[in-house]
Image (cartoon, rainbow, N blue to C red):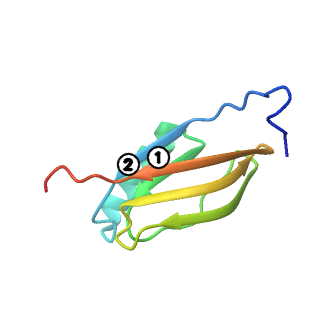
Amino acid sequence: MNNISGNIEAVFFKLGTRNVRGLRFPSRRKAVLIWLKNQNADISFLHIQYHGTEHARLEFELKQLWCDINSRFILLEAIIQDVKFYLCNIYSPNNF
């Protein structure tokens, strides 16, 4: 893993995020998968209750995962291309 106290190496990747619901319907699932493919993101956050496996174009290692009981936030500690990152996804509903 790279040491950030010395020279910092740039790591570029594209993040995507999307709030989705109703994925139990095949047509909705297909639409979300097409959207994800078109985004060409290296890492995507989907705010849903269920998840599946993903294709990885990056060297990615999940170290730790934190989330609240209502899944309003997710915090990941991950090693991406040999560099440590903390990625956070926060869900805030439009209506309270």
Q: Quadrant of residue 54?
A: bottom right
Tell me if 14 is positioned left or right of 81 in this view: left
Badge 2 vs badge 1, beta-carbon distance below 8 Å: yes
Where does residue 78 sit, x and y in percent of width and height?
Answer: 68, 54
Label 2 element class: strand
Q: Name the residue under label 2.
A: 18
Crowding near the residue tagged with mark 2, few <14, some 14–19, many ≥20 C-alpha atoms within 10 Å: some
Label 1 element class: helix
Q: How far apart are marks 2 and 1 (CA)?
A: 9 Å
* Residue 38 visible in the picture: yes
Where does residue 59 sit, x and y in percent of width and height?
Answer: 76, 48
Tell me if 29 is positioned left or right of 60 in this view: left
Residue 57: numbered disc: none
Task: Identify the residue at image location x=67%, y=51%.
Answer: 56
Q: Residue placed farthest to the front in the image?
A: 5
Task: Identify the residue at image location x=63%, y=35%.
Answer: 13
Task: Identify the residue at image location x=61%, y=48%.
Answer: 86
Amino acid of disc 1: Leu
Where does residue 50 sit, x and y in percent of width and height?
Answer: 43, 71
Q: In which quarter of the image is residue 6?
A: top right
Amino acid of disc 2: Arg
Q: Which of marks 2 and 1 is nearer the N terminus?
A: 2
Name the foreground residue: 3 vs 22.
3
Q: Mark 1 points at which residue?
A: 36
Q: Nearer the viewer, mark 2 or mark 1?
A: 2
